[in-house]
Image (cartoon, grey):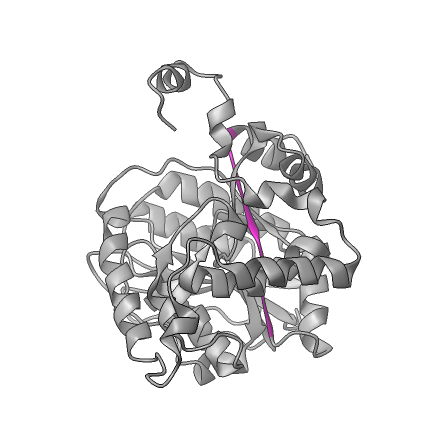
Amino acid sequence: MTPSSAPWPGDRSPPSIEAVVPVDLARRALGLLRRIRWLCEKHQTPPLSLVIGHNDRGSLFDAALKRMCKRYAVRLVSGAFYRGDINNARLRNEAMAAVTAPLTLLLDADLVLTDAALTSAAASILNGAFPFRVLPCLYLSRQGTRDLLHRGVDPQTLLDAYLRFKRGAFLHMALPSSVVLFRTQDFHRSGRFDTGFSGHGYEDFDFLLRLAWLHELVPRTPDLLTDCPSRAPLLLRGFRAHLARLALPGMLRNEFACHCWHAAPKDAYYAARARNARRLSDAMMAQIDASCDTAQTRDRAIDIPLLHFWLGLCDRHGKDPRDYLILFDGKPGHTDRLDTMRRKIGFLLGKD
């Protein structure tokens, strides 16, 4: 099947920011179609326009997506690009070929970003304050998702609740995240997405590290090989801590995204994370400066430079670090909620 890309409809002028959204309906087809429709309805006017990279498997769901994009005048880059495992890296590359706006936003179907946050982040790039932006992403619980999508609760209200340790609406803060706004010209300069990543995870970290190296924002030091996830953003280590420095300004500027809840079954899609983590480690190994002082980049229990960076950032913005103590908290948001029998049983058994 030959890939197809819809031109700009009618006399509508190209936007200044285009969001690249990868879509493969091999999983969560109905749920993804609902989320994509929500995005299409929300982004009918500037500052943002959608470009969907779609792997067409020839299903009824794929046909429904095409009709939806036509109805909402959303640009669709569609083709039978691959078979087998979902490959978001390939879909982003295909969609990027159709992007004409000066700025590109990496977006997923489950992400919600306010126009105010987007325009503020874009302005900070265009005025030279930042070469690109990585935005914090607040992962919402099922309750928080209902509040945002169906009850009209403002994202800022959800963020304020998160900062006050009110756990009902959120799970955790992803910092860094895959929500990245950058100059479109930097896409090819940084080397595009590596399509060797398939399934869930790490292709975004790989691209983001190369984007950061392009602008000399992350050192090529041995601690990059440390992959230590944490729900507490200020207790990250290794490459995640380096990338977190790029996202922390968004916390103080109220520039963030929300990730809507969806079920995450432990299937082959998520099992691919281990394979993708090894691929990223190999890619970083090839970039590490052999002459660097390993004594200065040893694996620490806490990344002290990250904490110093955060305190300095708060001082420069006139913010009180005590207002952001939640960033040290690694407990999952849902552990304080006992609103279902499953959670009650999990609580009694001592599980997260």
Image-based side of 338 in relation to 313, left or right: left
Q: How many marks?
A: 0
Q: Residue at x 24, y 54 (%)?
A: 274
- Residue 94 in the image: state x and y as whole percent: 38, 71
Residue 184 quadrant: bottom right
Q: Is residue 323 above or below residue 85?
A: above
In magenta, the rendered stretch is 132-142
Residue 279 seen by the camera: yes
Image-based side of 192 in relation to 260, left or right: left
Single out the residue that lies furthest toward the right: 318
Q: Nearer the viewer, residue 142 or 339?
A: 339
Q: Magenta part mainly helix, strand or loop?
A: strand
Q: Nearer the viewer, residue 170 or 238?
A: 238
Q: Residue at x 35, y 72 (%)?
A: 222
**228 drawn magenta:** no
- Residue 301 in the image: state x and y as whole percent: 42, 53
Q: Nearer the viewer, residue 217 or 185?
A: 217
Image-based side of 50 in relation to 205, left or right: right
Q: Residue at x 42, y 51 (%)?
A: 65
Could you tell me which quadrant the C terminus lies in? top left
Image-based side of 249 in relation to 60, left or right: right
Residue 134 seen by the camera: no
Single out the residue that lies furthest toward the front: 295
**133 drawn magenta:** yes
Q: Is residue 152 above or below residue 322?
A: above
Could you tell me which quadrant the N terminus lies in? bottom left
Q: Nearer the viewer, residue 3 or 106?
A: 106
Residue 226 quadrant: bottom left
Residue 316 quadrant: bottom right
